[in-house]
Image (spheres, grey):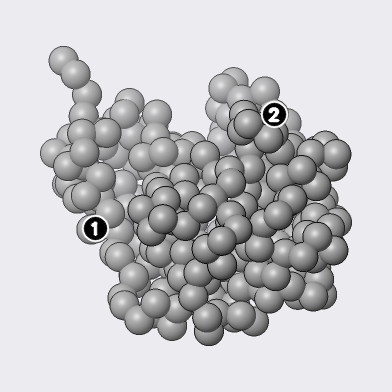
């Protein structure tokens, strides 16, 4: 496994970047799959797939914009079939809990013939520090249609640890790990944890789905992505993922990081600090 590189699709993203750093520290050769890489990779351009798959033995797949987005499963089917035909033996897929299109993508991977591992994840804790709600935290008010349904936010550091184990160690083939944090919090409770950890006045305000969509449209010129995010808050955030899982423990034998630990660790980096 260490003589040929591991391909990391989305290797500059939130999960992929962490996986790349861990593998590099282990002296495992890697290849980054992204549009800006020396050998470019784009999901929408299938002619870029074979060059990045050439002479690799394992692949980590983080699908852009999201594995639950419409059309993802068809792309995953085509890509995994090509990968297996080019002698890729191990594929680790980043998936989402409770998303129909994500489950169809999982099924396509399972049919591919590869030694597969699926990481089915909850909402990322790091969305508050690296994702769609970061700017709102900085402004001091997080506005989401989150309601009272709790979410066991998963720390991406845990996802990266599990992914590295699945890519480099035996015993993870054919495993579907549901990864979450150890405790479910509402979005309001999560924002309170951030406020306490950062020492800032950060508040949560419940807004309607319509207000959420309108606000996104003012900042992002990606109608399909806005529609998908709206779907996450209207259909997926209905309690189906509220129960914490023990997937991190099953995969690597330790307890998942808590949201409070995430908030304290992240606040210590100064990422939420606001200069006067």
At label 1, counting other C-alpha atoms closer than 10 Å, the crowd grade (few under 14, some 14-19, many 20 or more) is some
In the image, taking residue 117 as reference, residue 19 lies left or right, namely left
Residue 97 appearing in the image: no
At label 2, counting other C-alpha atoms closer than 10 Å, the crowd grade (few under 14, some 14-19, many 20 or more) is few
When asked about the image quadrant of residue 212, the answer is top right
Task: Please report the residue visible at 58 percent of the width from the left and 43 percent of the height from the top.
Answer: 32
The front one of 204 and 63 is 63
Q: How many marks?
A: 2
Task: Please report the residue visible at 40 percent of the width from the left and 64 percent of the height from the top.
Answer: 161
Q: Secondary structure at mark 1?
A: helix
Task: Please report the residue visible at 81 percent of the width from the left and 71 percent of the height from the top.
Answer: 112
The front one of 199 and 96 is 96
State which quarter of the image contains the N terminus.
bottom right
Q: Secondary structure at mark 2?
A: loop
Residue placed under numbered mark 2 in the picture: 222
Task: Please report the residue visible at 66 percent of the width from the left and 69 percent of the height from the top.
Answer: 90
Sequence-first tag of 2 and 1: 2
206 w.r.t. 151: above or below: above
Residue placed under numbered mark 1 in the picture: 260
In the image, taking residue 259 as reference, residue 116 lies left or right, namely right
């Amino acid at each position: 496994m260490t003589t040929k590189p591991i391909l990391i699709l989305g290797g500059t993203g939130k999960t992929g970047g962490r996986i790349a750093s861990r593998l590099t520290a282990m002296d495992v050769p890697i290849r980054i799959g992204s549009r800006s890489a020396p050998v470019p990779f784009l999901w929408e351009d299938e002619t870029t797939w074979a060059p990045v798959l050439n002479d690799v033995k394992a692949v980590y797949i983080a699908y852009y914009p999201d594995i639950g987005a419409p059309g993802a499963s068809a792309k995953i089917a085509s890509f995994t079939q090509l990968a297996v035909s080019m002698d890729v033996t191990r594929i680790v897929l980043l998936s989402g809990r409770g998303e129909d299109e994500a489950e169809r993508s999982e099924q396509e991977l399972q049919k591919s013939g590869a030694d597969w591992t699926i990481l089915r994840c909850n909402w990322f804790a790091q969305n508050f520090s690296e994702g769609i709600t970061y700017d709102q935290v900085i402004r001091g008010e997080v506005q989401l249609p989150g309601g009272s349904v709790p979410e066991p936010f998963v720390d991406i550091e845990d996802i990266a640890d599990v992914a590295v184990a699945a890519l480099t160690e035996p015993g993870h083939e054919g495993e579907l790990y549901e990864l979450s944090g150890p405790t479910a919090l509402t979005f309001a409770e999560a924002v309170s944890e951030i406020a306490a950890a950062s020492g800032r006045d950060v508040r949560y305000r419940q807004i309607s789905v319509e207000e959420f969509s309108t606000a996104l449209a003012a900042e992002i010129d990606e109608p399909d992505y806005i529609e998908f995010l709206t779907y996450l808050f209207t259909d997926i955030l209905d309690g189906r993922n509220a129960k914490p899982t023990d997937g991190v423990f099953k995969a690597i034998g330790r307890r998942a990081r808590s949201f409070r630990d995430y908030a304290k660790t992240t606040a210590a980096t100064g990422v939420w600090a606001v200069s006067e």
